Amino acid sequence: METTLLLRLFSKSLVILVLTITSSTLSAQQTAQEKRDSLHQVIPTLEGEEKLNAYLTMTNIDFTTVSTPEEINALIELYDAFEMEAKRQQNIRFQTLVKGNILILFRNRAMFDEVIQRAPEYIDFAYKNEQWTLLYRMYESYITAKKGSGKVDEALAIAQELYEQAKEANQSDGMGIAIATIGDIYSEMERYEESIDHYRQAIGLLEKIEPVHLNLPTIYFFLCQDLLSLNRFDEAQKELLGYEKANKRALEYKQMPANNPNAINLLITYARYYVLTEQYDKAELYCDSLENIGDIPHIENNVCQFRLHIYEARGQYDKALEMSERMDQYADGEINAYHTFRMTDRARLLSRMNRGEESFDLMREVLHQSDSLRNMDFNKQLDEVRTRYEVDRHILEKERTRSYFYFALVGCALLLIALTIWILYSRRLRAKNRALYQQIQARNQCRIVNENTLIARPKEELTREMNLYRELSLLMKREKLFTDPNLDRRVLAERLGTNEKYIADAIHSGSQETLSAYITRLRLQYATELLDSQPDLTLEAIALDAGFSSYRTFFRAFSQSFGMTPRDYRLFAQR
């Protein structure tokens, strides 16, 4: 159990460190610098994609060496010039490549705020231009930055967003990376069952990509590490074969050196597997292979860790103690959980070597450091909580004030809009009603003139129907029979001494109306006269005086005939 915990502590984080290792010597660095200077001189003379490739080579030289803020700023300026040239040539691929490399630059140097600030814009650019492969690398940097900033929930949400986008575009590459990224998050949370499931899904998608997907060996590495953490050795052994095959495909495709990062990680995974399964002779062979790579501190540290457990298992406590002491030279000198873990190892070994007093003193120091670390961690958590509380309180107050301001601003804007609409509507309505009032007046006046003209004409000039209509008009003008709500064709026929059919024919001949429409028109015409001349009469009284059975009937007939209400008509009549 101790072996599992120790090896999990070191090997799970090693892949990120190994991926940044370079075996360049001082002479190689000098050659790279000479090449950079040469490119700097020749770039102004180049054109087209040749110039863009020269920029790419020069930025790649600086990418692995910059460390200080000044050097990083200088490289960003070089990237800006690179991107400007790509824009000038309208080369979308190189524009996207620059953006992706900038994110990786900041991510590898733990400048997560920069990544989080830039990533959404860069991702949107790559998505709109369908630069799928580079888009997925950007997403990886973005998710890593979110995790590094402690925003695990947001990292998961972004990974899910990546998966949905890739699924919509039918891109196995993107779906595999998204699922593997979710697996990484679960792995860091030590939810190994879920991480293993996601890694296997990702491998299933990415293994189909030809000639090879370069993320495949890394995903295999993490899958094997999590299987070993759960002591599922048979499954780990099977996956190691797939790991070897994926690493071989990547090696052949990229023509990388034998001691490339993926190969180193494979050796480390085999060494850990054989240590945990107590096959120590085989484990030592892999440790020897790792040592032959060269003096690389992080690899040496893991080799010492493996050998410590091999020697302890064999009872070679003096050699195991030597490995533990050698590991101290790779520590940064800071008192932390790793340092305390090492001291616990040595105390255990000293006890087994019958050096009880030294073991006791060392454990007492371990307990003292554990208390100090616990207090430091507790105080740190209190400071974080206090800071978070103050920040959240300040943000909440600002948000509340801003919300009140926005609410008042929106309210005023809505009131202003409503007032403007009401004013415009009122003006238009008044203009419309004024035109309708004038139209009604003109229409009534025209009808009065026409009726007077008809009455003045001699009977001899008119047909029988028109003479009857003339008599009807005189009767209506003299007696206002239309004011009787019960007026009908029979009453009119009796008054004029004719039959009902002749009455209907006469009205149609004289006004082109039916009897009902004729009577309604006369009533409305009379109502307008009352509205003009009798301001004290109520609208209900006018309706009844004009011959309507109710105000409702009057209102409906008036509105349909004139396009305005009786009340609106009276407003203009009183002006």
Image (cartoon, helix red, strand yellow):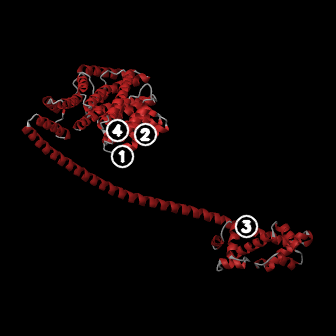
Name the residue beneath numbered marker 2: 162
Between disc 1 and disc 4, the foreground one is: 4
Between disc 3 and disc 4, the foreground one is: 4
Q: Residue furthest right?
A: 460
Q: Nearer the viewer, residue 353 or 130?
A: 353
Residue 263 placement (x, y as % from top left) = 31, 25
Q: Disc 1 residue type? A: Asp
Q: Nearer the viewer, residue 186 or 568?
A: 186
Pointer 1 or 4: first along the chain:
1
Instruction: Identify the image quadrant of residue 103.
Output: top left
Disc 3 versus disc 1: distance between alpha carbons?
76 Å
Between disc 3 and disc 2, the foreground one is: 2
Q: Nearer the viewer, residue 568 or 452?
A: 568
Name the residue beneath numbered marker 4: 184
Name the residue beneath numbered marker 3: 442
Pointer 3 or 1: first along the chain:
1
Pointer 1 or 2: first along the chain:
1
Q: Are marks 3 and 1 in contact (CB under 8 Å)?
A: no
Disc 3 versus disc 4: distance between alpha carbons?
86 Å
Mark 1 crowdedness (10 Å alpha carbons): few <14, some 14-19, many ≥20:
few
Disc 3 versus disc 2: distance between alpha carbons?
73 Å
Q: Are marks 3 and 2 in contact (CB under 8 Å)?
A: no
Residue 139 placement (x, y as % from top left) = 39, 37
Instruction: Identify the image quadrant of residue 190.
Output: top left
